């Protein structure tokens, strides 16, 4: 009897009977051979299950939900290089439109003609604004025949990008420390640190540690008075990573933007409350003269003259295109509706959490005071057999990332938890979260806690940019 061997058709192999999934994925050695796309996709797809559920990540400031149309635009833009403005002129035009829309939103007196740029995030935007401030200060000092060797900047408790900026460009950072009940920089704090070597004062309009706004107008008023008394003029840059895309819609009467003449530049993160996908930041100058020409490079790139001011070069255009989509799609009305819903959820959580456990709110989500977030600690003197680190760890069992962390130097003994409320965190989800808080606190009443301390129990980086 003849034997007939049927040639195996690998295309019809079940994925979990395939050769690619019969062994562990390569980790450190570069693979030798090619493999079927669907099999490798399944392998990588399955590994990503080990990531947390982004929608339950209440530590991150970044967006974790986008409309289907944003996903489609990102797919359409996957091969577009934002830096190649000659090859992709319409993408460059959309970037330019976003800059002038932001200038208008922030009340620039020259919104139609001022300068700005997109970045990969607000950290890069802060670096660029800091460089511009350094160059402006240096030009004034040189014109007066004064030394430029010891620049400093004054700020409250800031995100790490400002420490990087200060170290990379050899600038002394004069950071106002937190103290009990004194969570951000006041005019008095600032004036103690400002001198004629100060290149810029940086208020954070939406602190990473607490969610509170540092008040810009009182700082500016104090600097106005200082200039009248001494002749010393110091600029302000507003780090509006979060607040610059919140206050215009939910607290429009707060004077923090270019309505304050001393504010020379504003940075923000498009992928936070600008609602864009990850990888979008912005910096806009009050008017064109506030960005020194010497910082602008005119690059002959693929046959076109391309003015650029950036720390990066090639980067994807999709996030910028998606940002423009959101501006058109939502307008002022849509942003106000989305962010107001976030504030309402934050305030609901703040009201209910104090009923669940012995918590003291440091910030409760008031739109006049800060971003849609809430920050709390255990009440001083509260007798519990668990710490906030224990609670954060317990919440992770259900997938919730609610970070517990100590505040910066000088108040590092104060441990807090914080929730960021973003698009997609509904009242219904908030009630489910509260039920888990209640369940976990009851668990600690009945069991011994883990006794976690410090970094080993942190539930996520609280300062994401």
Image (cartoon, rainbow, N blue to C red):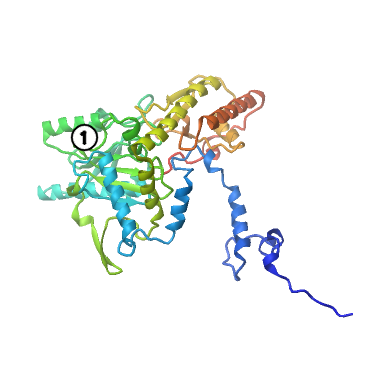
Observer-nearest of 398 and 18? 18
Observer-nearest of 261 and 386? 261
Q: Residue 53 falls in which quadrant of the image?
A: top right
Left or right of 375 in this view: 113: left
- Residue 189 in the image: state x and y as whole percent: 27, 30
Report the residue marked by disc 1: 260
Left or right of 456 in this view: 251: left
- Residue 296 in the image: state x and y as whole percent: 23, 57
Name the quadrant of the C terminus.
Answer: top left
Q: Which residue lies at the image location 48% right of the left edge and 33% below the top edge?
A: 419
Q: Residue 374 falls in which quadrant of the image?
A: top left
Q: Which residue lies at the image location 39% right of the left edge and 40% below the top edge?
A: 273
Left or right of 401 in this view: 218: left
Q: Is residue 372 above or below residue 85?
A: above
Name the quadrant of the N terminus.
Answer: bottom right
- Residue 249 in the image: state x and y as whole percent: 34, 34
Left or right of 389 in this view: 192: left
Q: Which residue lies at the image location 14% right of the left edge and 34% below the top edge?
A: 227
Mark 1 lies on a secondary structure that is: loop
Asked whether residue 74 is in view, the answer is: yes
> How many neighbours does mark 1 have within 10 angstroms: few (below 14), some (14-19), or many (20 or more)?
some
Asked whether residue 269 is in view, the answer is: no
Observer-nearest of 282 and 446? 282
Give the farthest residue toward the left: 144
């Amino acid at each position: 009897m003849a034997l007939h061997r049927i040639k195996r058709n690998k295309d019809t192999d079940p994925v979990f009977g395939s050769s690619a999934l019969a062994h562990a994925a390569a980790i450190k050695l570069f693979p030798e051979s090619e493999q079927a796309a669907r099999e490798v996709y399944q392998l990588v797809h399955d590994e990503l299950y080990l990531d947390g559920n982004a929608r339950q990540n209440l530590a991150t400031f970044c967006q974790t939900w986008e409309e289907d149309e944003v996903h489609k635009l990102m797919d359409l833009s996957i091969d577009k290089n934002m830096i190649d403005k000659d090859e992709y002129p319409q993408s460059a035009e959309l970037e330019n439109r976003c800059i002038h829309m932001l200038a208008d939103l922030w009340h620039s007196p020259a919104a139609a003609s001022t300068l700005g740029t997109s970045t990969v995030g607000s950290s890069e935007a802060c670096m660029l604004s800091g460089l511009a401030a350094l160059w402006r200060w240096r030009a004034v000092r040189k014109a007066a025949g004064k030394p430029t060797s010891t620049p400093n900047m004054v700020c409250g408790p800031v995100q790490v990008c400002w420490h990087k900026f200060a170290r990379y460009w050899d600038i002394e950072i004069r950071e106002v420390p937190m103290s009990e009940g004194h969570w951000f920089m006041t005019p008095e704090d600032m004036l103690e640190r400002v001198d004629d070597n100060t290149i810029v004062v940086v208020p954070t309009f939406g602190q990473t540690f607490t969610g509170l706004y540092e008040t810009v107008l009182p700082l500016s008023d104090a600097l106005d008075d200082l200039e009248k008394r001494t002749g010393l003029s110091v600029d302000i840059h507003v780090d509006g990573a979060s607040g610059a895309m919140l206050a215009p819609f939910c607290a429009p009467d707060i004077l923090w933007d270019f309505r304050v003449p001393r504010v020379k530049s504003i940075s923000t993160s498009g992928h936070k409350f600008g609602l864009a996908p990850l990888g979008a930041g912005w910096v806009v100058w009050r008017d064109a003269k506030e960005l020194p020409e010497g910082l602008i490079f005119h690059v002959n790139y693929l046959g076109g003259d391309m003015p650029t001011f950036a720390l990066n070069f090639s980067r994807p255009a999709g996030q910028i295109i998606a940002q423009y989509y959101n501006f058109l799609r939502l307008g002022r009305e849509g942003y106000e509706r989305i962010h107001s819903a976030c504030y309402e959820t934050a305030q609901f959580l703040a009201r209910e959490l104090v009923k669940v456990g012995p918590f003291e709110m440091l910030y409760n989500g008031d739109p006049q005071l800060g971003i849609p977030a809430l920050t709390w600690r255990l009440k001083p003197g509260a007798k519990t057999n668990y710490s906030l680190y224990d609670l954060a760890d317990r919440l992770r069992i259900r997938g919730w990332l609610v970070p517990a962390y100590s505040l910066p130097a000088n108040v590092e003994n104060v441990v807090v938890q914080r929730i960021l409320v973003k698009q997609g965190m509904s009242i219904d989800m908030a009630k489910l979260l509260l039920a888990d808080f209640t369940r976990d606190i009851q668990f600690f009443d009945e069991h011994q806690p883990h006794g976690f301390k410090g970094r080993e129990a942190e539930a996520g980086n609280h300062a994401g940019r």
